[in-house]
């Protein structure tokens, strides 16, 4: 059974020594309170492997990861909404089939595999067409963003399809059409005001998963974000990098969920829209 | 009318066949049986080809799929065991505990499995145990919610109240009234959780958090081969296709059962 436990459990002495280095004293509740205080003050200490300050290491990587998450969210929302709008406005089944395929891919292709496939396709295209420079620049942000956007895009299309099929929304569409509004105006202005709140809430509840996926995608594409930093820190058991990095990531995740909730409440049509009255 | 069970039977048969790969494969997946044919495509004797190190690719993938499925199955068992434990705790303890359990589960939803895995790898070292524990704890809120919803729905159902009125004891009520009706719902939730566990265990081992356990696993195989995607595409595509095939199989039976 030894192979299941791998390199072995870190001894209590290792953690006590780490605590002694950080200068925390008292029982574990007191130690944790001291740690949180130092975290809030930005005194994160020095990494054990490198002499670079942990705050600078984690802070720089966090910005890169956050950038990737934002790009993926924008791609997912724009792509998902466009697919639904095109399929509804023009009545083509191809965009709807694409939306369903996207949903199936999101459920059956792990994010790292999607990243590898996208990377391979881009490299092949670069070799065949001689677009090495273009692909190299796309690898920085757009390709990882596209790989990460697959699952949220599936959520957006699935969520919108389900909402558009609701009787209340169907009645609203009929009423708007009866007032002489065209499909572009209905889908581009009136329906988003009704559908935005649940969509924002749906995406916000998946913020944790999206951040986790971003860490994996960064490793696949070799982006200098939190993913490679935390993997290296975990494998080398750099406790302080891990605990500060994870706490920062958890706080961002919770902040995104809270922001999504606030945004969804503000966007509720009953608050200011005419459709909800 | 009872829903047809053939999808579940087909899924279990396929999983049993895949798991057999942990005990027997045509070639030893840990031994480079044909170094001279390294990186070749399908040849007589090696119908899926030979990987870059000279292993028979078919044997490697079969064993890899078996260990991946076994780890995901273990995670699923721990998910339901933990969820049942927390449900019992919530339903049978005095006032502050149920609220604490529900609050903890609500908070735990926000913690991605990968973060738990980093923490456990720091404490336990990179190992299959660390990954299984991370996925088991990370998916616990989802399993708990599914189990709780199914339980509450059944607990207030008329047939359970009738059993109650007829004087059926707790065990009798559970075995004859609740369990037969809760089972299909748990089957669907189990398939969803199993697919999630498959994705998580391969993703985490792809990151290198499983260490080098001495057995093949699909995420580990992809970790070792993905850099050769341009020079030896089949060596990367084959484990990727096996993984997607496994997930598609689970998804198809899950979606079909949902429709039935």
Image (cartoon, rainbow, N blue to C red):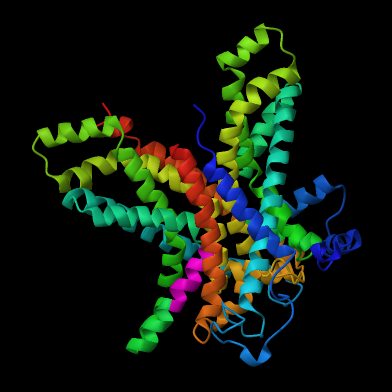
Instruction: Tell me if A242 is positioned left or right of B202 in this view.
Output: right
Residue in front for this viewpoint, B49 or A231: B49
Residue B250 is at least partly visible in this image: yes
Q: In which quadrant is the N terminus of chain A drawn?
A: bottom right
- Residue A47: x, y in percent? 73, 71
- Residue A140: x, y in percent? 45, 76
| In the depicted structure, whether residue A69 falls above or below residue A235 | above
Q: Is residue B252 magenta?
A: no
Residue A229 is at least partly visible in this image: no
Q: In which quadrant is the C terminus of chain A drawn?
A: top left
- Residue A200: x, y in percent? 40, 45
Q: Residue shown at 82%/66% (left/top)?
A: A3
Residue A11: quarter of image:
bottom right
Residue in front for this viewpoint, B200 or A249: B200
- Residue B167: x, y in percent? 71, 8
| In the depicted structure, whether residue B202 falls above or below residue A136 | above
Q: Give the magenta range.
A: A111-120
Q: Is residue A113 magenta?
A: yes
Give the tally of numbered discs. Answer: 0
Residue in front for this viewpoint, A76 or A190: A76
Instruction: Tell me if A256 is positioned left or right of A166 in this view.
Output: right
Q: Residue shown at 57%/50% (left/top)?
A: B11
Q: Main secondary structure of the magenta part?
A: helix
């Amino acid at each position: 059974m030894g192979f299941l436990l791998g390199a072995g459990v870190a001894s209590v002495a290792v953690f006590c020594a780490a605590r002694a280095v950080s200068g925390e004293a008292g029982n574990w509740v007191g130690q944790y309170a001291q740690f949180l205080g130092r975290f809030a003050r930005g005194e994160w200490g020095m990494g054990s492997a490198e002499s670079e300050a942990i705050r600078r290491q984690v802070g720089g990587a966090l910005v890169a990861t956050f950038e990737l998450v934002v790009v993926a969210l924008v791609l997912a929302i724009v792509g998902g909404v466009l697919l639904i709008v095109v399929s509804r406005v023009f009545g083509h089944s191809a965009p709807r089939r694409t939306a369903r395929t996207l949903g199936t891919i999101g459920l059956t292709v792990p994010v790292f595999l999607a990243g590898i496939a996208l990377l391979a396709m881009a490299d092949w295209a670069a070799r065949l067409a001689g677009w090495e420079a273009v692909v190299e620049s796309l690898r920085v942000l757009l390709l990882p963003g596209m790989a990460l956007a697959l699952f949220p895009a599936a959520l957006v299309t699935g969520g919108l399809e389900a909402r558009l099929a609701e009787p209340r929304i169907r009645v609203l569409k009929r009423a708007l059409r009866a007032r002489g509004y065209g499909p572009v105006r209905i889908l581009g202005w009136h329906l988003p005001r009704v559908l935005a709140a649940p969509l924002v809430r749906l995406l916000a509840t998946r913020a944790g998963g999206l951040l986790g996926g971003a860490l994996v995608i960064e490793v696949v594409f070799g982006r200098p974000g939190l993913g490679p930093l935390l993997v290296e820190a975990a494998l080398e058991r750099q406790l302080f990098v891990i605990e500060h990095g994870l706490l920062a990531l958890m706080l961002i995740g919770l902040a995104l969920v809270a922001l999504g909730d606030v945004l969804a409440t503000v966007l509720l049509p009953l608050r200011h829209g005419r459709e909800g009255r | 009318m009872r829903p047809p069970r053939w999808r579940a039977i087909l899924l279990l048969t396929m999983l049993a066949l895949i798991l057999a790969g942990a005990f027997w494969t045509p070639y030893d997946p840990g031994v480079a049986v044909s170094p001279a044919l390294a990186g070749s495509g399908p040849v007589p004797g090696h119908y899926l080809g030979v990987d870059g190190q000279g292993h028979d690719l078919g044997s490697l993938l079969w064993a890899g799929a078996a260990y991946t499925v076994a780890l995901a199955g273990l995670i699923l068992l721990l998910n339901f065991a933990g969820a049942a434990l927390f449900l019992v705790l919530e339903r049978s303890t005095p006032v502050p505990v149920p609220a604490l359990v529900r609050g903890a589960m609500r908070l735990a939803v926000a913690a991605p499995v990968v973060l738990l895995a980093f923490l456990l790898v720091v404490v336990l070292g990179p190992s299959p145990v660390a990954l299984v524990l991370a996925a088991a704890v990370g998916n616990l809120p989802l399993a708990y919610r599914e189990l709780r919803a199914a339980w509450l729905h059944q607990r207030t159902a008329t047939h359970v109240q009738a059993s109650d009125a007829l004087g059926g004891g707790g065990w009798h009520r559970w075995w004859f009234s609740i369990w037969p009706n809760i089972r299909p719902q748990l089957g669907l939730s189990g398939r969803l959780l199993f697919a999630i566990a498959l994705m998580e265990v391969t993703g985490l081992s792809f990151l290198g958090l499983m260490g080098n356990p001495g057995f093949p696993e699909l995420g580990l195989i992809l970790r070792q081969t993905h850099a050769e995607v341009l020079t030896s595409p089949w060596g990367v595509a084959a484990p990727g296709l096996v993984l997607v095939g496994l997930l598609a199989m689970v998804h198809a039976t899950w979606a079909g059962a949902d429709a039935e």
